[in-house]
């Protein structure tokens, strides 16, 4: 069985950059690795991603958003994540269930247990072995997102600062409740320092 690792964090935390860097390190170590992201990761999931992130979909309700994320995740787990794990690969996934607990539950006011239960069903109970939460202040994360994307922010990124603060607080609360699974990394450090902090921990599982 392989190793399932997820990276989480507020928008602009640098998750995607770290996944690329970690994938290179694992590859250079001779380890077979598969990188993926959510929402997305399969043709069907990518179509759902387009709906979720399209700024024009302003009428989307909180419950619809939550269910679409879970649907995308169900397809992703069945088509990509479980098969890769069964092949003994290391999976590096940009976002997973923790993101739904932060963005849809706390962010949008849906009961946490409702979101947790639906995602438990969608994934048949598959949780990562290790999660790295790259934490940055909400203001800094949004500044980074805006600098990198300009005015092309997606539907979620366009939400107000208070929403993003709730999301960050929930990520930190989850980390506090699950210290055996989640490692909090200071995302205000240099890109190299963040990579090194994660790499030193991942090596214990290889």
Image: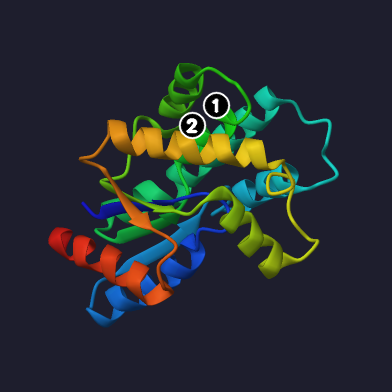
Q: Residue 162 lies in what quarter of the image? A: top right
In the rendered image, residue 195, in percent from the top left (x then y), is placed at: 34, 70
Tell me the tag on residue 113.
none
Counting every numbered tag in the picture gives 2
The residue carrying mark 1 is 105
Farthest residue to the bottom: give it: 28
Instruction: Determine whether, in the image, residue 27 is placed left or right of residue 16.
Output: left
In the rendered image, residue 148, in percent from the top left (x then y), is placed at: 67, 69
Q: Find out whether the residues at labels 1 and 2 contact each other: C-beta distance under 8 Å.
A: yes
2 or 138: which is nearer to us?
138
- Asked if residue 85 can be seen in this view, the reply is yes
Tell me the SS state at disc 1: helix
The residue carrying mark 2 is 101
Instruction: Determine whether, in the image, residue 201 is placed left or right of residue 135.
Output: left
124 or 53: which is nearer to us?
53
Tell me the SS state at disc 2: helix
Few, some or many residues within 10 Å of mark 2 (<14, 14–19, 20+): many
Few, some or many residues within 10 Å of mark 1 (<14, 14–19, 20+): many
- The residue at 72%/49% (across/down) is 50
Q: Residue 147 lies in what quarter of the image? A: bottom right
User: In this picture, is 7 found above or below 103?
Assistant: below
């Amino acid at each position: 069985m392989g190793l399932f690792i997820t990276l989480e964090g507020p928008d602009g935390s640098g998750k995607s950059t770290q996944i690329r860097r970690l994938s290179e390190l694992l590859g250079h170590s001779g380890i077979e690795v598969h990188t993926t992201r959510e929402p997305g990761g399969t043709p069907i999931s990518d179509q759902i991603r387009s709906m979720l992130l399209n700024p024009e979909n302003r009428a989307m309700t909180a419950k619809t958003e939550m269910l679409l994320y879970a649907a995308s995740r169900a397809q992703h787990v069945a088509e990509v994540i479980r098969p890769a794990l069964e092949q003994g690969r290391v999976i590096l996934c940009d976002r997973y269930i923790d993101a739904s607990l932060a963005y849809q539950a706390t962010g949008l006011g849906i009961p946490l247990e409702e979101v947790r239960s639906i995602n438990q069903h969608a994934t048949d109970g598959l949780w990562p072995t290790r999660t790295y939460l790259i934490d940055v202040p909400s203001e800094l994360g949004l500044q980074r997102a805006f600098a990198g994307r300009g005015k092309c922010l997606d539907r979620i990124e366009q939400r107000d600062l208070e929403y993003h603060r709730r999301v960050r607080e929930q990520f930190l609360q989850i980390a506090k409740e699950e210290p055996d699974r989640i490692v909090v990394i200071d995302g205000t450090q240099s890109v190299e320092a963040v990579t090194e902090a994660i790499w030193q921990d991942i090596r214990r599982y290889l």
